[in-house]
Image (tube, rainbow, N blue to C red):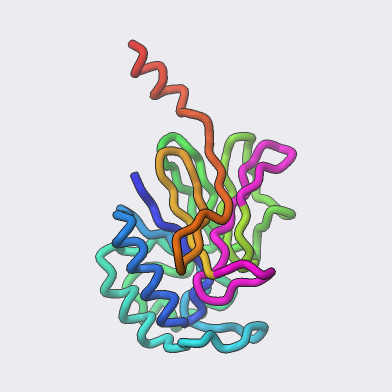
Amino acid sequence: MKILIGSDIHGDAEACRALLHTAETEGAERLVLLGDLLYHGPRNDLPPAYAPKQVIDMLNRSPLRPLCVRGNCEAEVDAMVLSFPVMADYAFLEWDGIRIFATHGHLFSPEHLPPLCAGEVFLSGHTHIPMAETDAQGILCLNPGSAALPKGGWPRSYMLYENREFTVRCLEDGRVLCRAALPPDPEKQISSEE
């Protein structure tokens, strides 16, 4: 299974178009968005291609119906214009035996984690800075960065998941910015050895 993970589009139509095009060219089977889809927020400058109505249209027409969590810039009106749920603070996901807690990052963060166990994944956006690090408790903390408004000198970015590996890539040229791989699923190893 190949999944494209994006965050912090902030109403930038060019960033949204590039993200959806990348999902198509990469052959992604699913699209996960970690919030802050339409509004730029009071702490950010307007994105270069700020056009929230175009972003609404592109996301609503996408053949990959997004799985989305609420960012700190989402409002109830966003739920009225988008054709998929956007107001959940978090989602529990499981891919290839990996338990994942997906959230935007303003309620929970790597510094303020929900109750997770070693070997589980904390997936968030919000900071606009890519991350792929395992903390002292053995929890993999991931962040795809921002598709529209990167910070900390990083380029616009997204994340791909495939075969128990998470790779953060540059939205412009696809180069790898950081990555994290989880060990093979022990249940699959047992069944394949039988």
Residue 100 image offset from top left, x and y in percent: 51, 46
Question: Which residues are the magenta region?
Answer: 132-155
Residue 63 image offset from top left, x and y in percent: 25, 65
Residue 71 image offset from top left, x and y in percent: 55, 70
User: Relative to 84, is 93 above or below?
Assistant: above
Residue 118 relative to residue 61: left or right? right
Q: Is residue 190 visible?
A: yes
Q: Residue at x 54, y 63 (%)?
A: 89
Quarter of the picture holding the N terminus: top left
* Location of residue 109 (image quadrant): bottom right
Q: Among all residues in the image, which is located at the extreme top?
A: 194
> Magenta span has 142?
yes
* Location of residue 54 (image quadrant): bottom left
Residue 39 image offset from top left, x and y in percent: 52, 83
User: Relative to 159, is 49 above or below?
Assistant: below
Closer-to-camera residue (181/62): 181
